[in-house]
Image (cartoon, rainbow, N blue to C red):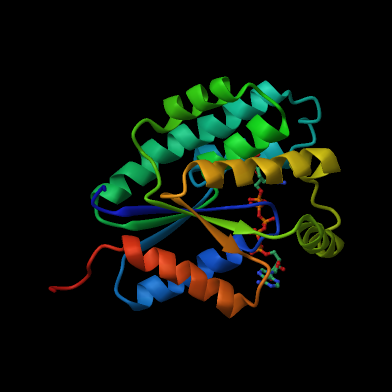
Amino acid sequence: MSKGRLITFEGTEGCGKSTQVRLLTERLKSLGHRVRNLREPGGTPIGEEIRHTLKHSHNNAAMTAEAELLLMNASRAQLVREIIRPALAEGEIIICDRFYDSTTAYQGFGRELDLAHVKAVIDFAVGETKPDLTLFLHVPAEVSAERLRSRQATMPFVRDRIEESDQKFFERVAHGFGVIAAQEPQRVKFINGNQQLDVVCARIWEQVEQVLPRVGRW
Ligand code: Z5A
């Protein structure tokens, strides 16, 4: 393991990642850990511009799946080198809202790009930088869709190209996450996200405790 820790959250939209990232960060800070939150795509000035192109730009309607794959990983390559590696070297705990499993799930399974090509691009973007722990928050498709609907109702003017994809796409993505979790059970921990907030939080903590570095003098 590197000096710091890289913990990633994954799952379909609305599964509760951002909420749990916030709660975990507060808990870790209260215990004296140095914690940094990141998100993908984004997390650096360059990455945030790429995020805008991928999600919200009004000129992105013709984006191909291949361009989407490369842009996700351009953002990631920048994030890994500009932020993640230096922060890990300083002993920080990095909590990242999505990382490369999202590429496998969305661009690989969802967009149906060749999985070997997807893996090659990811490998090029991250090199040896891999998560110590990945928390896969699972919620049923109806729950995900309902949470998304209620959010869209409060932000009707914010366009999101990826969220405009059809239902079959999201079904393939959800299936992809299940495959990833089954393939790497040591790293990827399945968490039922369709429970009370504090219960989800407790299940996450059980996993996080096992990979934490020691703080203080003991
Ligand atoms: N993407 C990709 O295609 N390829 C890649 O390589 C990467 C990403 C890295 C990023 O979108 C998009 O990019 C995403 C995948 C794609 N696209 N889609 N579609 P984003 O960053 O804008 O959003 P997101 O990652 O999809 O997350 P989200 O939709 O914002 O949801 P969330 O963070 O998982 O959930 P939340 O905001 O914490 O919770 C959603 C709501 O549910 C909120 O009102 C909460 O209060 C509520 N909530 C949370 N937990 C609970 C529980 N336990 N019970 C009840 N209600 C809850």
Closer to the camera in the image, 107 or 33 = 107
Where residue 73 sits: x, y (%)? 53, 31
- Residue drawn at 40 percent across, 64 percent down: 208
Q: Quick one: which residue is furthest to the left in this view?
A: 217
- In which quarter of the view is residue 145 placed? bottom right
51 is higher (above) or lower (below) than 147: above
Tally the numbered discs. Answer: 0
- In which quarter of the view is residue 56 placed? top right
Quadrant position of the C terminus in the picture: bottom left
Closer to the camera in the image, 56 or 143 = 143
- Residue drawn at 61 percent across, 65 percent down: 192
- Residue drawn at 59 percent across, 25 percent down: 115
Q: Is residue 180 visible?
A: yes
Closer to the camera in the image, 112 or 129 = 112
Q: Is residue 104 left or right of residue 159?
A: left
Where residue 70 sits: x, y (%)? 58, 25
- Residue drawn at 86 percent across, 63 percent down: 153
Q: Is residue 173 left or right of residue 75?
A: right
111 is higher (above) or lower (below) than 212: above
Where residue 61 sits: x, y (%)? 81, 30
- Rendered-image quarter of ligand 1: bottom right
